[in-house]
């Protein structure tokens, strides 16, 4: 009997593994849709609970109102920004193609404005071939802008797949936010782990998702918006495009928006626009550069953050493997990895009778 029971149990686990893998293959085309529908439902779950309490337990109405709030404060602004960004990229590509925006000429002008000692150093390393550098920079800028413009236009086209994915995400969001507690309880009960381990890992999962999306995206949006406004004030063309680039770079710790506004400020200073260059540099250091230290502890909380170097490496690795979704998946995998090893450390200490912190986070 025990042998048959073990065989049946092993067969069931193999079947469970097979159908789980099959489901992953079925959902693979809608991976981003499922991911972001789940993330948005997780973020807006407190709003749903608040509305349910105010509406006398009517979960369907509360979920519909939560969906409406999500569309108004998240989906519509993102759609507007995406449309503006596509227009900016197309305009920049047209300027580069027509020759009205000559990146090589800007570089040559900046090099000539450098001190003579710096120019001598560049000449020593054969970096003062300005006509050659200008030609290569212009050609490179044209290729990059063409690639970005083509990609942006293809993404911006309203296709059937995009429309279907969008409505599937909203459909999933409605049911996930409505039945979030029941789904969470079912998943928690099905995980074959110790109750303490389950609580710790689920808490870490929820914390990292909310911190990465709600906190980091909010900080990145603020930094990108402030940077774009600053570039617009000093007269830089394509301020929306550069602001979006700064927003993306702000997701990476130790890199940040300085990679955009820093070179622009240096260019302005080197070409004689002292007031604009100094103004941009001061604004970048005092406002853009410090906003992270002000907002992130408020939106995320210091006790929920991974070390910056872990976030940087895991984010870059996640993006390189699975694209833009990697900025969420990468830090999440890193956080769960650290949590699992932390739980193992606690178990080993408990077996040895050594005192260990009850809350390793």
Image (spheres, grey):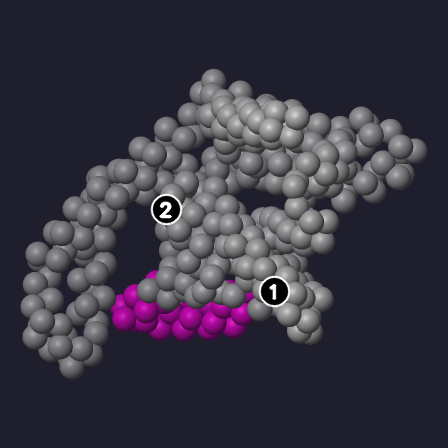
**Residue 241 image offset from top left, x and y in percent:** 41, 47
Which part of the image, by quadrant, shows the C terminus?
A: bottom right
Look at 11% across and 67% down and name the residue there.
Answer: 127
Which residue is most to the top? 160
The quadrant holding residue 290 is bottom right
Residue 224, above or below 255: above
State the count of labels: 2
For the point 89% across and 32% down, which residue is it? Answer: 57
Neighbour tally class for label 2: few under 14, some 14-19, many 20 plus, Cα within 10 Å = some
Q: Residue at x 60, y 53 (%)?
A: 208
Q: Earlier in the sequence, mark 2 or mark 1?
A: 2
In the rendered image, residue 281 lying in the magenta stretch gets the answer yes
The residue where tag 1 is placed is 348
**Which residue is outermost to the right?**
56
CA gap between label 2 and label 1 equals 35 Å
- 177 to 213, vertically: above or below: above
Which residue is at 18% across, 53% downward?
137
Image position, residue 17 (x, y; %): 53, 29
**Magenta stretch, residue numbers:** 264-292
**Which label was assigned to residue 320?**
2
**Closer to the eye: label 2 or 1:** 1
Callout 1 secondary element: helix
Frontmost residue, 266 versus 53: 53
Residue 347 part of the magenta-drawn span: no
């Amino acid at each position: 009997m025990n042998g048959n029971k073990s065989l049946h149990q092993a067969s069931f686990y193999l079947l469970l593994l097979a159908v789980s893998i099959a489901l992953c293959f079925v959902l693979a085309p809608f991976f981003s849709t499922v991911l972001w529908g789940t993330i948005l439902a997780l973020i807006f779950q407190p709003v749903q609970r608040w509305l349910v309490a105010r509406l006398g337990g009517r979960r369907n109405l509360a979920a519909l109102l939560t969906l409406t709030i999500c569309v108004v404060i998240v989906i519509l602004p993102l759609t507007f920004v995406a449309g503006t960004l596509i227009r900016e990229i197309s305009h920049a590509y047209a300027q580069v193609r027509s020759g009205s925006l000559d990146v090589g000429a800007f570089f040559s002008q900046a090099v000539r404005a450098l001190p003579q000692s710096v120019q001598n150093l560049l000449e020593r390393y054969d970096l003062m071939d300005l006509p050659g550098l200008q030609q290569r920079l212009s050609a490179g800028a044209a290729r990059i802008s063409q690639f970005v413009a083509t990609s942006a236009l293809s993404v911006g086209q309203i296709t059937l797949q995009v429309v279907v994915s969008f409505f599937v995400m909203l459909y999933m969001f409605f049911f996930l936010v409505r039945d979030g507690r029941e789904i969470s309880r079912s998943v928690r009960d099905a995980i074959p782990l110790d109750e303490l381990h389950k609580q710790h890992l689920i808490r870490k999962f929820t914390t990292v998702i909310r911190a990465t999306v709600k906190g980091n995206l909010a900080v990145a949006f603020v930094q990108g918006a402030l940077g774009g406004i600053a570039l617009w004030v000093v007269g830089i063309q394509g301020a929306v495009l550069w602001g979006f680039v700064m927003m993306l770079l702000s997701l990476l710790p130790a890199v940040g928006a300085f990679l955009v506004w820093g070179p622009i400020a240096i260019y302005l200073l080197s070409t004689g626009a002292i007031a604009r260059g100094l103004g941009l540099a001061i604004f970048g250091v005092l406002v853009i550069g410090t906003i992270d230290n002000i907002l992130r502890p408020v939106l995320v909380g210091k006790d929920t953050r991974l070390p910056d170097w872990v976030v940087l490496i895991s984010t870059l690795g996640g993006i390189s493997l699975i694209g833009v979704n990697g900025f969420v998946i990468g830090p999440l995998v890193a956080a769960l990895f650290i949590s699992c090893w932390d739980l193992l450390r606690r178990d080993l200490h408990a077996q040895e009778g050594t005192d260990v912190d009850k809350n390793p986070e």
